[in-house]
Image (cartoon, helix red, strand yellow):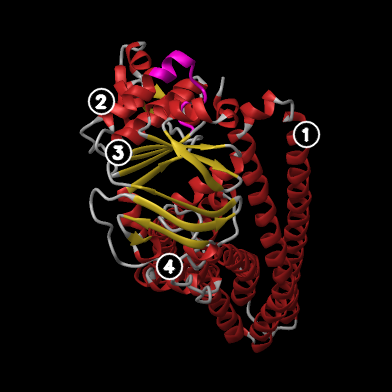
């Protein structure tokens, strides 16, 4: 038997590198255009200082017109470069976020589950918020480079006026980034914790919505609400902590940037007063001191966004790089085969052994619900073969040697709580749109009354989780979907627990008729289904204790009669 893949998951940094590598073209053009934008912004106060310097000397209309033309070119360059640069970067960002969402969803839909240790609600958060924040790195890097260009251009321009002004900008920027890089680490760790707690709250909501009806049934909704409120409160407190850290970061960045701008302005004023720079250079220095606030703010925000992107990428790595719970072989089961369990030990199952030949309709009467659930989980390959003892054979081939995709195509295990999706009755019965037995499946599952009740028929709309259907209608819709799949081996787990006795009797006969000649296993305590089966296996304390027809067992086994009587 093969063991599951135990390769080491790749870290979040690899995901960020992948995002950067496949968007290098868009990032290059975005960096060029945003660098041009920042250079144009920086050139404006420089040009203004030169205009003041030369216009005051020449005092001619030609010099004034040339100056106005130069400013118009700079403004046009700034406007167009920003527009097209941001368009390129945001398109790449949105496309990359979509790719990661699809990749996370693809991992969740793989036949072999991944050992990520996450609930569906947490995976949903990763596929949405974390995918978006990871893709932000595509905008962060070009904006970081372009803001660096602006700071360097300003430093060079000020350094040409007086070396002390240029050094002041360079040294001040280095100090600001040093302080903020330390604070950004706290943001990264706080953000990771916040995302994890929000994901747990989302998972709790998903669980509550799924189990809302039974919770109301036994009065557990208030306890469940208190449990959710506790998880949600923890997420709220962590969100407040993150907001506080972000606020401290933003406040510190603004204060340091303002201090540097004020330092440049005051130093330039002192140099002008001392006669070491001209009036035009003073105008330029004051203008750059005001302008440099924007790129400095952008530049100082980048470490925070980098840490947030990395935190999100590391959470995505939990899903994308998680090893599968089991590794299966490449073989395919032969068409029309049977099903065999040989000494399977798992959960409540104790050396369970039985065989269903091809084409037989077998019912399994499980006295303990836990044993029925464990058997269904093993057959549905929700439990990897290495996690239980014994062997499961499909069409004579060991399950571990078969391709999981081929097993799912060959053998369908329909759970008692089959999920209902938003869409129509038709798309719920035949999601792929390829089934040729939809009409027969609708009739066999006694869903005809639901179809006839609405003018749209099979195109009648169904809400998420079947909210506009009754419990019995949802169960019959799930059964119709299983029958329409027309699998070689069909395993049904309690398919009629929510329908009335008369409807259940009709469904049992219809299943036997529709599935004649196809291997069918029904795990149930329904007398109607037990009576319709060719053979009944009694599952008690994890082993098969008796077998025969339903009527023979009723006549000769008092315990069986008590267990299945209604």
**Secondary structure type for disc 3:** helix
Mark 1–mark 2 CB contact (< 8 Å): no
| Residue 566 seen in the current view | yes
Count residues near mark 4 (Cα–Cα under 10 Å), then give few for <14, some for 14-19, many for 20+.
many
Residue farthest front in this picture? 556
**Residue ID for mark 2:** 440
**Residue ID for mark 1:** 223
Per the rendering, the mark at residue 485 is 3
Mark 3–mark 2 CB contact (< 8 Å): no
Q: Which residues are magenta?
A: 494-505
User: Residue 60 placed where, x, y %?
Assistant: 44, 67
Seen in the picture, residue 542 relative to 72 is either above or below; the reply is above
Seen in the picture, residue 211 relative to 1 is either above or below; the reply is above
State how far apart marks 3 and 1 are (Cα).
Answer: 39 Å
User: Residue 49 placed where, x, y %?
Assistant: 56, 71
Q: If you read the primary sequence from the N terminus, does the residue marked by circle 1 or circle 4 appear first?
A: 1
**Secondary structure type for disc 4:** loop
State how far apart marks 4 and 3 are (Cα).
Answer: 26 Å
**Residue ID for mark 4:** 327
**Secondary structure type for disc 2:** helix
Name the residue nearer the viewer: 556 or 129: 556
Which residue shows up at 57% across the image and 56% down it? 346
């Amino acid at each position: 038997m093969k063991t599951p893949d135990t390769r080491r998951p790749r870290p979040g940094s690899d995901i960020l590198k992948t995002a950067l590598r496949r968007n290098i073209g868009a990032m290059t053009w975005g960096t060029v255009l945003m660098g041009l934008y920042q250079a144009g912004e920086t050139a404006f106060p420089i040009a203004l200082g030169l205009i003041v310097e030369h216009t005051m000397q020449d005092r001619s209309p030609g010099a004034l017109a040339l100056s106005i033309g130069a400013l118009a070119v700079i403004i046009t360059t700034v406007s167009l470069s920003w527009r097209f640069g941001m368009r390129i970067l945001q398109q790449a960002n949105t496309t990359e976020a979509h790719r990661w969402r699809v990749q996370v969803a693809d991992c969740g839909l793989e036949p072999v589950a991944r050992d990520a240790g996450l609930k569906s609600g947490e995976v949903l958060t990763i596929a949405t918020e974390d995918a978006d924040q990871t893709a932000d790195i595509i905008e962060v890097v070009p904006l970081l480079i372009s803001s660096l260009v602006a700071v360097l251009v300003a430093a060079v321009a000020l350094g040409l006026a007086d070396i002390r002004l240029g050094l002041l900008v360079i040294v001040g920027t280095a100090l600001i980034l040093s302080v903020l890089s330390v604070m950004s680490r706290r943001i990264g760790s706080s953000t990771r914790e916040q995302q994890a707690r929000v994901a747990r709250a989302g998972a709790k909501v998903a669980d509550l919505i799924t189990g809302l009806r039974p919770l109301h049934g036994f009065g557990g909704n208030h306890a469940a609400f208190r449990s959710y409120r506790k998880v949600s409160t923890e997420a709220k407190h962590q969100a407040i902590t993150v907001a506080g850290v972000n606020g401290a970061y933003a406040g510190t960045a603004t204060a340091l940037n303002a201090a540097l701008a004020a330092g440049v302005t005051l130093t330039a004023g002192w140099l002008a007063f001392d006669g070491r720079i001209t009036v035009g250079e003073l105008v330029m220095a004051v203008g750059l001191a005001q302008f440099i606030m924007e790129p400095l703010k952008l530049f100082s925000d980048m470490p925070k966004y980098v840490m947030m992107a990395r935190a999100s990428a590391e959470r995505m790595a939990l899903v994308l790089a998680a090893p599968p719970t089991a590794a299966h072989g490449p073989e395919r089961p032969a068409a029309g085969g049977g099903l065999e369990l040989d000494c399977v030990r798992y959960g409540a199952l104790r050396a369970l052994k039985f065989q269903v030949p091809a084409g037989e309709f077998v019912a399994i009467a499980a006295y303990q619900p836990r044993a029925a659930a464990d058997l269904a989980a093993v057959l549905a390959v929700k439990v990897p073969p290495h996690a239980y003892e014994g062997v499961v054979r499909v069409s004579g081939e060991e399950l571990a040697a078969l391709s999981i995709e081929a097993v799912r195509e060959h053998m369908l295990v329909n759970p008692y709580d089959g999920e209902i999706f938003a869409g129509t009755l038709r798309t719920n019965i035949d999601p792929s749109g390829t089934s040729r037995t939809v009409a027969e499946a609708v009739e066999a599952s006694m869903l005809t009354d639901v179809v006839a009740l609405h003018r749209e028929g099979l195109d009648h709309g169904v809400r998420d989780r079947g909210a506009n259907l009754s419990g019995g209608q949802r169960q019959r819709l799930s059964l119709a979907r299983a029958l329409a799949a027309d699998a070689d081996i069909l395993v049904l787990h309690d398919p009629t627990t929510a329908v009335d006795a008369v409807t259940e009797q009709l469904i049992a006969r219809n299943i036997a008729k529709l599935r004649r000649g196809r291997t069918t296993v029904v795990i149930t305590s329904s007398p109607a289904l037990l009576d319709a089966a060719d053979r009944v296996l009694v599952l008690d304390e994890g082993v098969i204790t008796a077998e025969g027809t339903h009527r023979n067992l009723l006549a000769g086994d008092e315990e069986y009669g008590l267990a299945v009587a209604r």
